[in-house]
Image (cartoon, grey):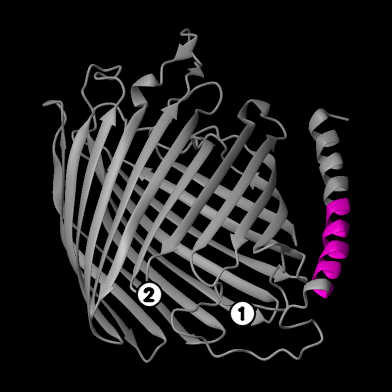
Amino acid sequence: MSGFDSLRRSWGSAIGALATVFVVLGASYASAQQPPTTGATPYVRPVPSRGETVTSRKRPQYDPVGIRVGSFFVYPSFEFTELFDSNIFATSTNAKTDFVAILSPEIAVRSNWRRHELNFGARGDIGRYKSHQKENYEDFSTVINGRYDISRSTIVFAGFRFAQRHEDRGSPDDVGGKVPTTFLATELAGGAQHIFGRFTVRFDGTIRLLDFRDVAAAGPVELIDNDDRDRREHTGVLRLTYRVNPRLAVFAQGTGVYVRYNEQLDNAGLRRSNVGFAVVGGVVFELTGKLVIEAFAGFSRRTYESSLLSTVSGPSGGLSLTWTPTGLTTVKLAVARSIEQTTLIGASGFFATQARASIDHELRRNIILNGFGSFQNDDYEGTSRNDNYIRAGLGATVLINRNLNMYGGYEFTRRISNVTGSGFVRHLVIFKIKGQI
Protein backbone atom coordinates (compact mmCIF):
# COMPACT_ATOMS: atom_id res chain seq x y z
CA MET A 1 0.00 0.00 0.00
CA SER A 2 1.39 3.42 -0.98
CA GLY A 3 1.89 6.19 1.57
CA PHE A 4 -0.83 8.20 -0.18
CA ASP A 5 -3.35 5.34 0.01
CA SER A 6 -2.48 4.84 3.66
CA LEU A 7 -3.00 8.56 4.30
CA ARG A 8 -6.27 8.45 2.38
CA ARG A 9 -7.56 5.54 4.49
CA SER A 10 -6.46 7.26 7.69
CA TRP A 11 -8.25 10.45 6.63
CA GLY A 12 -11.31 8.40 5.71
CA SER A 13 -11.40 6.85 9.18
CA ALA A 14 -10.80 10.24 10.77
CA ILE A 15 -13.61 11.80 8.75
CA GLY A 16 -16.00 9.03 9.77
CA ALA A 17 -15.11 9.44 13.41
CA LEU A 18 -15.31 13.23 13.25
CA ALA A 19 -18.64 13.06 11.45
CA THR A 20 -20.02 10.94 14.29
CA VAL A 21 -18.63 13.37 16.86
CA PHE A 22 -20.15 16.36 15.01
CA VAL A 23 -23.57 14.66 14.89
CA VAL A 24 -23.54 13.68 18.57
CA LEU A 25 -22.09 16.92 19.89
CA GLY A 26 -24.22 18.97 17.55
CA ALA A 27 -27.37 17.32 18.82
CA SER A 28 -26.40 17.94 22.44
CA TYR A 29 -25.47 21.60 21.82
CA ALA A 30 -28.66 22.15 19.83
CA SER A 31 -30.64 20.79 22.73
CA ALA A 32 -28.75 22.85 25.29
CA GLN A 33 -28.97 26.16 23.45
CA GLN A 34 -32.53 25.79 22.16
CA PRO A 35 -32.15 27.43 18.74
CA PRO A 36 -35.20 29.30 17.44
CA THR A 37 -36.20 26.54 15.01
CA THR A 38 -35.83 22.79 15.53
CA GLY A 39 -35.95 19.87 13.14
CA ALA A 40 -39.54 19.21 14.24
CA THR A 41 -40.75 22.60 13.05
CA PRO A 42 -42.58 22.48 9.69
CA TYR A 43 -40.55 23.98 6.85
CA VAL A 44 -41.97 27.07 5.15
CA ARG A 45 -40.26 28.54 2.10
CA PRO A 46 -39.50 32.15 3.04
CA VAL A 47 -40.12 35.20 0.91
CA PRO A 48 -36.65 36.68 0.14
CA SER A 49 -35.75 39.83 2.06
CA ARG A 50 -33.95 42.79 0.51
CA GLY A 51 -30.49 41.77 -0.64
CA GLU A 52 -31.04 38.18 0.43
CA THR A 53 -30.08 35.36 -1.92
CA VAL A 54 -30.56 31.60 -2.02
CA THR A 55 -27.05 31.03 -0.64
CA SER A 56 -27.04 33.81 1.99
CA ARG A 57 -30.47 33.09 3.43
CA LYS A 58 -30.56 31.62 6.92
CA ARG A 59 -31.74 28.03 7.21
CA PRO A 60 -32.47 27.36 10.90
CA GLN A 61 -32.85 23.61 10.29
CA TYR A 62 -29.43 23.30 8.63
CA ASP A 63 -27.28 26.19 9.89
CA PRO A 64 -24.69 25.30 12.56
CA VAL A 65 -25.67 26.25 16.10
CA GLY A 66 -22.17 26.80 17.41
CA ILE A 67 -20.83 26.57 20.95
CA ARG A 68 -21.66 29.46 23.24
CA VAL A 69 -18.72 30.73 25.29
CA GLY A 70 -19.74 33.77 27.30
CA SER A 71 -20.81 36.45 24.82
CA PHE A 72 -19.19 34.64 21.87
CA PHE A 73 -20.19 31.76 19.62
CA VAL A 74 -17.55 29.31 18.41
CA TYR A 75 -18.11 27.50 15.10
CA PRO A 76 -15.65 24.65 14.44
CA SER A 77 -15.76 22.77 11.14
CA PHE A 78 -13.82 20.14 9.24
CA GLU A 79 -13.90 19.70 5.46
CA PHE A 80 -12.50 16.93 3.28
CA THR A 81 -12.18 17.46 -0.47
CA GLU A 82 -11.36 14.87 -3.12
CA LEU A 83 -10.36 16.51 -6.39
CA PHE A 84 -9.54 15.20 -9.86
CA ASP A 85 -7.41 17.61 -11.91
CA SER A 86 -6.93 16.83 -15.61
CA ASN A 87 -3.98 19.25 -16.02
CA ILE A 88 -2.18 19.90 -12.75
CA PHE A 89 0.65 21.91 -14.37
CA ALA A 90 -1.68 23.91 -16.68
CA THR A 91 0.33 23.00 -19.79
CA SER A 92 -0.71 23.22 -23.44
CA THR A 93 0.66 19.72 -24.24
CA ASN A 94 1.49 16.53 -22.34
CA ALA A 95 -1.04 17.30 -19.61
CA LYS A 96 -0.55 15.43 -16.32
CA THR A 97 -3.59 14.22 -14.39
CA ASP A 98 -3.80 13.49 -10.69
CA PHE A 99 -6.09 13.09 -7.68
CA VAL A 100 -5.74 15.58 -4.83
CA ALA A 101 -6.97 15.05 -1.27
CA ILE A 102 -7.43 18.24 0.78
CA LEU A 103 -8.01 18.48 4.53
CA SER A 104 -9.44 21.81 5.72
CA PRO A 105 -9.96 22.32 9.47
CA GLU A 106 -11.48 25.68 10.37
CA ILE A 107 -12.70 27.59 13.38
CA ALA A 108 -14.69 30.84 13.53
CA VAL A 109 -15.44 32.88 16.65
CA ARG A 110 -18.12 35.59 16.48
CA SER A 111 -19.30 38.03 19.13
CA ASN A 112 -22.95 38.17 20.16
CA TRP A 113 -23.24 41.79 21.26
CA ARG A 114 -25.97 44.34 20.78
CA ARG A 115 -23.35 46.91 19.76
CA HIS A 116 -19.88 46.55 18.31
CA GLU A 117 -18.50 43.35 16.82
CA LEU A 118 -15.40 41.17 17.16
CA ASN A 119 -14.61 38.11 15.04
CA PHE A 120 -11.76 35.65 14.72
CA GLY A 121 -11.09 32.87 12.25
CA ALA A 122 -8.41 30.36 11.32
CA ARG A 123 -8.27 27.80 8.52
CA GLY A 124 -5.83 25.30 7.10
CA ASP A 125 -5.77 23.64 3.66
CA ILE A 126 -3.47 20.62 3.45
CA GLY A 127 -3.26 19.23 -0.08
CA ARG A 128 -1.81 15.84 -0.97
CA TYR A 129 -1.34 14.59 -4.56
CA LYS A 130 -1.54 10.88 -5.30
CA SER A 131 1.22 10.70 -7.96
CA HIS A 132 2.96 14.09 -7.91
CA GLN A 133 3.93 14.54 -4.27
CA LYS A 134 6.19 17.51 -5.08
CA GLU A 135 3.00 19.49 -5.68
CA ASN A 136 1.83 18.91 -2.08
CA TYR A 137 1.09 22.07 -0.13
CA GLU A 138 0.12 23.35 3.30
CA ASP A 139 -1.81 26.62 3.21
CA PHE A 140 -3.22 28.41 6.24
CA SER A 141 -4.79 31.71 7.17
CA THR A 142 -5.88 33.54 10.29
CA VAL A 143 -7.94 36.69 10.59
CA ILE A 144 -9.28 38.98 13.29
CA ASN A 145 -11.59 41.92 12.64
CA GLY A 146 -14.02 44.10 14.48
CA ARG A 147 -16.29 47.11 14.45
CA TYR A 148 -16.78 49.85 17.06
CA ASP A 149 -20.08 51.72 17.01
CA ILE A 150 -19.40 55.26 18.09
CA SER A 151 -23.03 56.14 17.48
CA ARG A 152 -25.92 54.98 15.31
CA SER A 153 -24.49 56.98 12.44
CA THR A 154 -20.74 56.57 12.96
CA ILE A 155 -18.63 53.42 13.04
CA VAL A 156 -14.94 52.55 12.80
CA PHE A 157 -13.60 49.14 11.84
CA ALA A 158 -10.29 47.32 11.53
CA GLY A 159 -8.92 43.92 10.67
CA PHE A 160 -5.73 41.89 10.43
CA ARG A 161 -5.06 38.84 8.24
CA PHE A 162 -2.02 36.60 7.90
CA ALA A 163 -1.80 33.74 5.44
CA GLN A 164 0.54 31.35 3.70
CA ARG A 165 -0.52 30.47 0.17
CA HIS A 166 0.89 28.67 -2.86
CA GLU A 167 0.88 30.05 -6.38
CA ASP A 168 -1.34 28.22 -8.84
CA ARG A 169 0.49 26.57 -11.74
CA GLY A 170 -1.91 28.27 -14.13
CA SER A 171 -0.80 31.78 -13.11
CA PRO A 172 1.22 33.68 -15.76
CA ASP A 173 3.45 34.86 -12.87
CA ASP A 174 4.34 31.27 -11.90
CA VAL A 175 8.14 30.89 -12.15
CA GLY A 176 8.01 27.19 -13.04
CA GLY A 177 9.94 25.77 -10.11
CA LYS A 178 10.25 22.11 -9.14
CA VAL A 179 7.62 22.74 -6.48
CA PRO A 180 4.89 25.40 -6.24
CA THR A 181 5.97 28.85 -5.12
CA THR A 182 4.77 29.70 -1.61
CA PHE A 183 4.29 33.22 -0.30
CA LEU A 184 3.24 34.97 2.88
CA ALA A 185 0.53 37.62 2.80
CA THR A 186 0.05 40.03 5.71
CA GLU A 187 -2.82 42.49 5.54
CA LEU A 188 -3.85 45.33 7.83
CA ALA A 189 -7.11 47.10 7.03
CA GLY A 190 -9.24 49.74 8.65
CA GLY A 191 -11.66 52.54 8.03
CA ALA A 192 -14.64 54.56 9.12
CA GLN A 193 -18.16 55.35 7.99
CA HIS A 194 -20.42 58.27 8.87
CA ILE A 195 -24.04 58.93 7.88
CA PHE A 196 -25.41 62.47 7.90
CA GLY A 197 -28.87 62.97 6.49
CA ARG A 198 -29.02 61.31 3.08
CA PHE A 199 -25.24 61.28 2.71
CA THR A 200 -22.84 58.49 3.67
CA VAL A 201 -19.09 58.95 3.61
CA ARG A 202 -16.82 55.92 3.98
CA PHE A 203 -13.06 55.43 3.93
CA ASP A 204 -11.26 52.08 3.60
CA GLY A 205 -7.48 51.74 3.88
CA THR A 206 -5.38 48.62 3.37
CA ILE A 207 -1.68 47.79 3.68
CA ARG A 208 -0.70 44.43 2.21
CA LEU A 209 2.76 42.83 2.48
CA LEU A 210 3.72 40.01 0.10
CA ASP A 211 6.79 37.84 0.72
CA PHE A 212 7.54 35.25 -1.99
CA ARG A 213 9.80 32.36 -1.03
CA ASP A 214 12.66 31.21 -3.24
CA VAL A 215 11.90 27.91 -4.96
CA ALA A 216 14.00 25.04 -6.30
CA ALA A 217 14.62 25.43 -10.04
CA ALA A 218 13.81 22.83 -12.67
CA GLY A 219 16.98 23.72 -14.65
CA PRO A 220 20.70 23.87 -13.82
CA VAL A 221 20.23 26.82 -11.39
CA GLU A 222 19.62 25.55 -7.86
CA LEU A 223 17.17 28.24 -6.73
CA ILE A 224 14.87 30.74 -8.39
CA ASP A 225 15.23 34.11 -6.67
CA ASN A 226 11.76 35.45 -5.84
CA ASP A 227 12.92 38.28 -3.57
CA ASP A 228 12.40 40.80 -6.38
CA ARG A 229 8.65 40.05 -6.19
CA ASP A 230 8.35 41.04 -2.51
CA ARG A 231 6.35 44.25 -2.10
CA ARG A 232 4.04 46.47 -0.06
CA GLU A 233 0.70 47.49 -1.51
CA HIS A 234 -1.06 50.54 -0.04
CA THR A 235 -4.67 51.20 -1.05
CA GLY A 236 -7.09 53.91 0.06
CA VAL A 237 -10.72 54.21 -1.04
CA LEU A 238 -12.98 57.19 -0.32
CA ARG A 239 -16.67 56.89 -1.25
CA LEU A 240 -19.46 59.45 -0.95
CA THR A 241 -23.03 58.19 -1.38
CA TYR A 242 -26.24 60.17 -1.67
CA ARG A 243 -29.50 58.28 -1.14
CA VAL A 244 -32.11 59.81 -3.41
CA ASN A 245 -34.85 57.57 -2.02
CA PRO A 246 -35.02 54.17 -0.25
CA ARG A 247 -34.43 52.36 -3.57
CA LEU A 248 -32.00 54.67 -5.36
CA ALA A 249 -28.53 55.96 -4.45
CA VAL A 250 -25.73 57.63 -6.41
CA PHE A 251 -22.06 57.66 -5.43
CA ALA A 252 -18.62 58.98 -6.32
CA GLN A 253 -15.50 57.01 -5.42
CA GLY A 254 -11.79 57.71 -5.55
CA THR A 255 -9.06 55.08 -5.09
CA GLY A 256 -5.35 55.67 -4.58
CA VAL A 257 -2.73 52.90 -4.93
CA TYR A 258 0.97 52.89 -4.05
CA VAL A 259 3.07 49.73 -4.58
CA ARG A 260 6.62 49.65 -3.27
CA TYR A 261 8.93 46.71 -4.09
CA ASN A 262 11.49 45.75 -1.45
CA GLU A 263 14.27 45.59 -4.03
CA GLN A 264 14.70 48.69 -6.18
CA LEU A 265 15.58 46.57 -9.22
CA ASP A 266 14.00 43.25 -10.15
CA ASN A 267 15.98 40.39 -11.70
CA ALA A 268 15.53 41.99 -15.14
CA GLY A 269 16.93 45.34 -13.91
CA LEU A 270 13.57 47.17 -13.84
CA ARG A 271 12.10 49.42 -11.14
CA ARG A 272 8.60 48.02 -10.64
CA SER A 273 7.39 50.32 -7.85
CA ASN A 274 4.32 52.22 -9.03
CA VAL A 275 1.58 54.64 -8.11
CA GLY A 276 -1.95 54.89 -9.45
CA PHE A 277 -5.50 56.08 -9.03
CA ALA A 278 -9.05 55.33 -10.13
CA VAL A 279 -12.00 57.73 -10.14
CA VAL A 280 -15.51 56.42 -10.77
CA GLY A 281 -19.12 57.46 -10.38
CA GLY A 282 -22.09 55.17 -10.16
CA VAL A 283 -25.60 54.32 -9.11
CA VAL A 284 -27.25 51.65 -6.96
CA PHE A 285 -30.93 50.96 -7.32
CA GLU A 286 -33.54 48.33 -6.49
CA LEU A 287 -36.54 47.32 -8.55
CA THR A 288 -39.52 45.72 -6.76
CA GLY A 289 -37.21 44.54 -3.99
CA LYS A 290 -36.04 41.56 -6.07
CA LEU A 291 -33.52 43.19 -8.40
CA VAL A 292 -30.48 45.12 -7.14
CA ILE A 293 -28.16 46.78 -9.67
CA GLU A 294 -24.91 48.65 -9.13
CA ALA A 295 -23.24 50.28 -12.13
CA PHE A 296 -20.18 52.54 -12.20
CA ALA A 297 -17.72 53.96 -14.72
CA GLY A 298 -14.60 56.12 -14.63
CA PHE A 299 -10.90 56.26 -15.39
CA SER A 300 -7.81 54.43 -14.01
CA ARG A 301 -4.09 55.08 -14.36
CA ARG A 302 -0.92 53.35 -13.11
CA THR A 303 2.58 54.88 -13.53
CA TYR A 304 5.78 52.93 -12.92
CA GLU A 305 9.11 54.09 -11.54
CA SER A 306 11.07 52.66 -14.47
CA SER A 307 10.74 54.54 -17.75
CA LEU A 308 11.04 51.16 -19.49
CA LEU A 309 7.69 50.06 -18.06
CA SER A 310 4.70 51.48 -19.91
CA THR A 311 2.03 53.46 -18.10
CA VAL A 312 -1.30 51.63 -17.91
CA SER A 313 -4.35 53.87 -18.24
CA GLY A 314 -7.85 53.81 -19.65
CA PRO A 315 -11.56 53.54 -18.86
CA SER A 316 -12.58 51.40 -15.90
CA GLY A 317 -15.91 50.44 -14.46
CA GLY A 318 -18.27 47.67 -13.63
CA LEU A 319 -21.76 46.34 -13.24
CA SER A 320 -23.25 43.98 -10.69
CA LEU A 321 -26.77 42.62 -10.78
CA THR A 322 -28.53 40.39 -8.27
CA TRP A 323 -31.97 39.15 -9.23
CA THR A 324 -34.07 36.98 -6.94
CA PRO A 325 -37.29 36.33 -8.88
CA THR A 326 -38.54 33.90 -6.20
CA GLY A 327 -37.37 32.46 -2.90
CA LEU A 328 -35.97 29.52 -4.85
CA THR A 329 -33.68 31.15 -7.43
CA THR A 330 -30.97 33.82 -7.48
CA VAL A 331 -29.28 35.07 -10.65
CA LYS A 332 -26.10 37.17 -10.49
CA LEU A 333 -24.21 39.06 -13.17
CA ALA A 334 -20.92 40.89 -12.64
CA VAL A 335 -18.76 42.84 -15.09
CA ALA A 336 -15.59 44.72 -14.14
CA ARG A 337 -12.51 46.31 -15.71
CA SER A 338 -9.50 47.19 -13.58
CA ILE A 339 -5.69 47.51 -13.56
CA GLU A 340 -3.89 44.56 -11.97
CA GLN A 341 -0.35 43.92 -10.76
CA THR A 342 2.01 41.46 -12.48
CA THR A 343 5.66 40.39 -12.33
CA LEU A 344 5.60 38.89 -15.83
CA ILE A 345 8.88 39.74 -17.56
CA GLY A 346 8.48 42.70 -19.92
CA ALA A 347 5.01 43.70 -18.70
CA SER A 348 4.27 46.65 -16.42
CA GLY A 349 0.70 45.66 -15.55
CA PHE A 350 -2.46 44.57 -17.28
CA PHE A 351 -6.09 45.51 -17.72
CA ALA A 352 -8.35 42.69 -16.54
CA THR A 353 -11.84 42.73 -18.06
CA GLN A 354 -14.15 40.17 -16.50
CA ALA A 355 -17.74 39.06 -16.95
CA ARG A 356 -19.39 36.36 -14.84
CA ALA A 357 -22.94 35.02 -14.62
CA SER A 358 -24.18 32.54 -12.03
CA ILE A 359 -27.42 30.96 -10.87
CA ASP A 360 -28.34 29.28 -7.60
CA HIS A 361 -31.54 27.28 -7.32
CA GLU A 362 -33.10 25.56 -4.31
CA LEU A 363 -34.33 22.31 -5.83
CA ARG A 364 -35.50 21.09 -2.45
CA ARG A 365 -35.20 22.63 0.97
CA ASN A 366 -31.88 20.80 1.50
CA ILE A 367 -30.58 20.61 -2.11
CA ILE A 368 -29.07 23.70 -3.74
CA LEU A 369 -27.96 23.62 -7.37
CA ASN A 370 -25.49 26.11 -8.80
CA GLY A 371 -23.96 26.93 -12.16
CA PHE A 372 -21.69 29.66 -13.51
CA GLY A 373 -19.94 30.85 -16.64
CA SER A 374 -17.30 33.55 -17.01
CA PHE A 375 -15.01 35.24 -19.50
CA GLN A 376 -11.89 37.23 -18.70
CA ASN A 377 -9.45 39.13 -20.92
CA ASP A 378 -6.00 40.08 -19.60
CA ASP A 379 -4.30 42.66 -21.81
CA TYR A 380 -0.66 43.10 -20.74
CA GLU A 381 0.90 46.53 -21.18
CA GLY A 382 4.44 46.67 -22.55
CA THR A 383 4.19 43.30 -24.29
CA SER A 384 1.98 41.86 -26.98
CA ARG A 385 0.63 39.18 -24.65
CA ASN A 386 -3.13 38.86 -24.49
CA ASP A 387 -4.88 36.06 -22.58
CA ASN A 388 -8.54 35.04 -22.65
CA TYR A 389 -10.01 32.77 -19.97
CA ILE A 390 -13.23 30.83 -20.38
CA ARG A 391 -14.58 29.19 -17.23
CA ALA A 392 -17.76 27.29 -16.47
CA GLY A 393 -19.03 24.97 -13.78
CA LEU A 394 -21.98 23.36 -12.11
CA GLY A 395 -22.56 21.66 -8.81
CA ALA A 396 -24.96 20.67 -6.07
CA THR A 397 -24.90 21.07 -2.30
CA VAL A 398 -26.82 18.60 -0.13
CA LEU A 399 -27.59 19.76 3.42
CA ILE A 400 -27.93 16.54 5.44
CA ASN A 401 -28.46 18.16 8.85
CA ARG A 402 -26.98 20.91 11.00
CA ASN A 403 -23.71 19.04 11.26
CA LEU A 404 -23.11 17.53 7.83
CA ASN A 405 -23.31 18.70 4.23
CA MET A 406 -21.87 17.50 0.93
CA TYR A 407 -20.95 19.12 -2.37
CA GLY A 408 -20.24 17.67 -5.79
CA GLY A 409 -19.31 19.67 -8.86
CA TYR A 410 -17.41 20.09 -12.10
CA GLU A 411 -15.38 23.07 -13.35
CA PHE A 412 -13.84 23.80 -16.75
CA THR A 413 -11.08 26.32 -17.52
CA ARG A 414 -9.55 27.22 -20.87
CA ARG A 415 -6.87 29.83 -21.46
CA ILE A 416 -6.41 31.09 -25.01
CA SER A 417 -3.16 33.04 -25.37
CA ASN A 418 -1.29 34.62 -28.26
CA VAL A 419 1.95 33.40 -26.64
CA THR A 420 2.90 29.99 -28.03
CA GLY A 421 2.61 27.23 -25.43
CA SER A 422 0.74 29.37 -22.87
CA GLY A 423 -2.79 28.13 -23.53
CA PHE A 424 -4.28 25.20 -21.65
CA VAL A 425 -7.48 23.31 -20.90
CA ARG A 426 -8.31 22.08 -17.41
CA HIS A 427 -11.11 19.93 -16.03
CA LEU A 428 -11.82 19.61 -12.31
CA VAL A 429 -14.18 17.10 -10.68
CA ILE A 430 -14.83 17.99 -7.04
CA PHE A 431 -16.39 16.18 -4.08
CA LYS A 432 -16.56 17.69 -0.58
CA ILE A 433 -17.94 16.59 2.74
CA LYS A 434 -18.10 19.00 5.65
CA GLY A 435 -18.78 18.48 9.33
CA GLN A 436 -19.69 21.44 11.52
CA ILE A 437 -21.13 22.33 14.90
| Location of residue 225 in the rendering, given as x and y in whole percent from the top left corner | 41, 16
> In the figure, 430 relative to 53: above or below?
above
Q: Is residue 412 visible?
A: yes
Q: Quadrant of the N terminus?
A: top right
- Residue at x 81%, y 36% (from the top left corner): 7
| Relative to 32, 290 lies left or right | left
Residues 185 and 353: in front is: 185
Span colored in magenta: 16-31
| Location of residue 297 in the rendering, given as x and y in whole percent from the top left corner | 18, 64
| Location of residue 388 in the rendering, given as x and y in whole percent from the top left corner | 34, 49
| Mark 1 or mark 2: whose residue is earlier in sequence | 2
Q: Amino acid at mark 1?
A: Glu
> In the figure, 373 relative to 174: above or below?
below
Residue extending farthest front: 150
Q: Which mark is residue 217?
A: none
Q: Are marks 1 and 2 in contact (CB under 8 Å)?
A: no
| Location of residue 127 in the rendering, given as x and y in whole percent from the top left corner | 66, 38
Q: Which residue is mark 1?
A: 362
Q: Amino acid at mark 2?
A: Arg
> Mark 2: which secondary structure?
loop
Q: Which residue is mark 2?
A: 152
| Relative to 292, 360 lies left or right | right
- Residue at x 73%, y 78% (from the top left corner): 35
> Mark 1: which secondary structure?
strand
Q: For the stretch drawn in magenta, what is the main secondary structure?
A: helix
